[in-house]
Image (cartoon, rainbow, N blue to C red):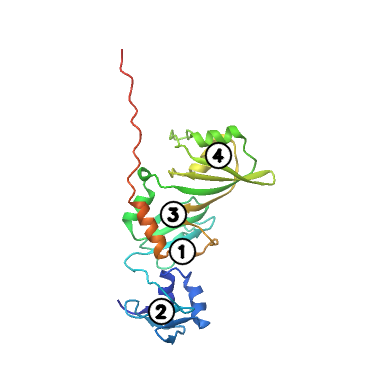
Amino acid sequence: MAEERIQKILARAGFGSRRANEILIATGRVKVNAETAVLGSKADPKSDKIYVDGQLVKIVDEEYQYIALYKPRMVLSDRVNEDPRRTVFDIVPYSRSLFVVGRLDFESEGLMLLTNDGELANQLTHPRFGHEKEYRVLLARKPDEQQLNAWRRGVVLEDGHRTQPAEVKLDAAAGKGAWVRVIMKEGHKRQIREICGQIGLPIVKLMRVRIGTLLLGTLKPGDYRSLTSPEIKKLKELAVIKPVKKPVVRKAPKI
């Protein structure tokens, strides 16, 4: 493997953005073998040993990239021809070859995964695998038990799609409104917004905090980082779970 800038290697190993790693290097906290690194230093991750604060860095294989991103509001999740609005690919440099795992609508925010591992991306997003996604939703008014139960059971959307049962829990009061935590295993377009529209609950804020085993953590809007080796391993272990089989509905015989 050819030499690379050290901040790039550290970003891939989960030490935050390249800018954050430049600060680590500039403050003398990074060593390559026995030498203190400086800005502009390069290393070969195959043969050199890199240390941060004296701890050996575990290098992530570059064959695939796995990037966790906090998508801000008013940012597109994907490329749209002739649309001047900002996209997640404008936030993460050198990301044009990556797939988006778990799109969010323009007004929503929170965790997204960008990767060039197409098999993993498909298994994490295809509804037949039934992997969980978790959201925090700020509602303009407090929901009553009837509204929550309707949400939990499933709602028929305008296009005729009936949503699957979901876990919906009242999290905390917020003035006249409330925070609700939602865990679901499907991702129909604008699903949460449409459900809330059907049951009369205006949304103030919609944020995704988890995809499968991957957590949003301490990322702030517009922040991104490379996944650590344990995070990648957990996602891959999750992805090999067999698809969820839908129950067979048998029609009663005609008499």
Q: Sequence order check: which comes first, mark 3 or mark 4?
A: 4
Residue type at numbered disc 4: Cys
Q: Sequence order check: which comes first, mark 3 or mark 1?
A: 1
Q: Sequence order check: which comes first, mark 2 or mark 1?
A: 2
Alpha carbon distance from label 4 to label 2? 50 Å
- Please name the residue that numbered disc 3 is placed on: 213
Residue type at numbered disc 3: Thr
Q: Sequence order check: which comes first, mark 4 or mark 2?
A: 2
At a point 41% along the width and 59% down the height, the residue shown is: 114
Alpha carbon distance from label 3 to label 2? 28 Å
At a point 35% along the width and 28% down the height, the residue shown is: 249
Q: Sequence order check: which comes first, mark 1 or mark 4?
A: 1
At a point 42% along the width and 65% down the height, the residue shown is: 228
- Please name the residue that numbered disc 2 is placed on: 50
At a point 41% along the width and 74% down the height, the residue shown is: 57
Where is residue 218, by image quadrant? Answer: bottom right
| Mark 2 neighbour class, 10 Å CA radius: few under 14, some 14 to 19, many 20 or more | many
- Please name the residue that numbered disc 4 is placed on: 196
Name the outermost residue toward the bottom. Answer: 35
